Structure formats: C-alpha cells, structure tokens
Amino acid sequence: SVSDMLRLFVMDLMGRHTLDGMLYEKLTNSLYQNCVPQLSRSFKVIVWASLIVLNYFLVSLCISFSQRRSQEWIRSLIFAWVVGWIIDAVFCECLECLWINLLVPLTCSKKATQCKIILRNCAAIARWLQYQENVVQDEFNTAD
C-alpha cells in the first residue's frame, strides 16, 4: 500500500541499519501492526481462483462473440486492444514512475528529515538516560 511505501521510503532516508532507522521501524511496527488487515492464505487462494475463473469466462465469451462477427471487426478489435495496451504501458506506467520516484520523495523529504532529527534526539536522550542509569548503578554498587 502507499503508506507502507512511504514508511519504507522514510526508513531508507534514515538508513535501515542505523540507530534512527531501527528505532523508526520498531516504532512504526508497534503503532501500525494492528491497523493493517491480515488476510488468510485461504482467502487469497479463493480470490486468485475467482480471478482465474472470471478471466477464463470473459476470454471464452469474447471468443464466442467474435465468431459471430466478421474478420474485419476482429482485426479492428485487436488493433484497439494493442493501441490501448500501448497507451497504458507508455502513459500510465510513466506517470506511476514519476509519481513514485519524483513527486512522493519531493513532498515527503522535508518531513522525513524532521522525523530523522526527532528520532536522533530521542536516541541521544535514550543513550544519556542509559548512561545516567549505569552511573547511578555504579555509585550504588561502590557504596556497598
């Protein structure tokens, strides 16, 4: 989904193996793991089987319908299908690539950088608190 792609994009900006990236991944996993619906394997199999049956039915219907038409009509139908496929491949796919590779990063990079700074500050605070806890424990242990 789009939210998962944006989440992965932000993780890539932060660096997946850096402390910031790992903190962000854990935070988003804990916050959004219950929001994403989990589909069972049997449901996915049923959907795939339904799509295959529906495609077979529609292709059979097109073949039986085209048998009643002339050869010229079939050629024009195939030509229209090829033109539609080319338009889809050139226009829609190019727009999708532009959207994913250019527009989404441009609109999200400032917010992602702000999130990275906030997470870095949180990580620094967590390290400082851990250090303070160790100092207190060392003082407590040396007092005994």
Image (cartoon, rainbow, N blue to C red):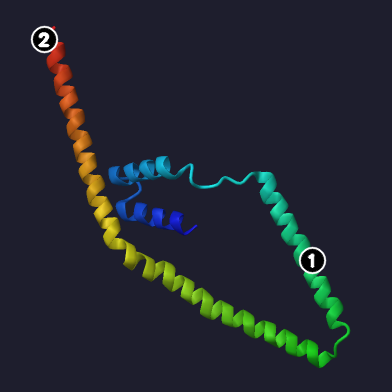
Give left or right: position of 132 versus 11: left
The relative height of residue 97 versus residue 68 in the rendered view (above or below) is above
Q: Which quadrant of the view contains residue 42?
A: top right
The crowd level at tag 1 (other Cα within 10 Å; few <14, some 14-19, many 20+) is: few
Q: Which mark is residue 56?
A: 1
The relative height of residue 44 versus residue 89 in the rendered view (above or below) is above
Q: Residue furthest right?
A: 68
Q: Secondary structure at mark 2?
A: helix
In percent of width and height, residue 76 lies at: 74, 90
Give left or right: position of 63 versus 6: right
In percent of width and height, residue 83 lies at: 63, 85
Name the kind of residue labelled 1 in the image.
Answer: Tyr
- Of the two numbered discs 1 and 2 on the same chain, state the one appearing first in sequence: 1
The relative height of residue 6 versus residue 66 in the rendered view (above or below) is above
In percent of width and height, residue 74 lies at: 79, 87
- Report the residue at 58% width, 78% height from top: 88
- Distance (Cα) linking label 1 and label 2: 80 Å
Name the kind of residue labelled 2 in the image.
Answer: Ala
- Report the residue at 30% width, 56% height from top: 112
In percent of width and height, residue 96 lies at: 48, 71
Q: Kindly indicate whether the residue at mark 2 contacts the one at mark 1 (C-beta within 8 angstroms).
A: no
The relative height of residue 6 versus residue 57 in the rendered view (above or below) is above
- Report the residue at 14% width, 6% height from top: 144
| Residue highlighted by disc 2 | 143
Q: Looking at this view, is 90 or 55 the one in front? A: 55
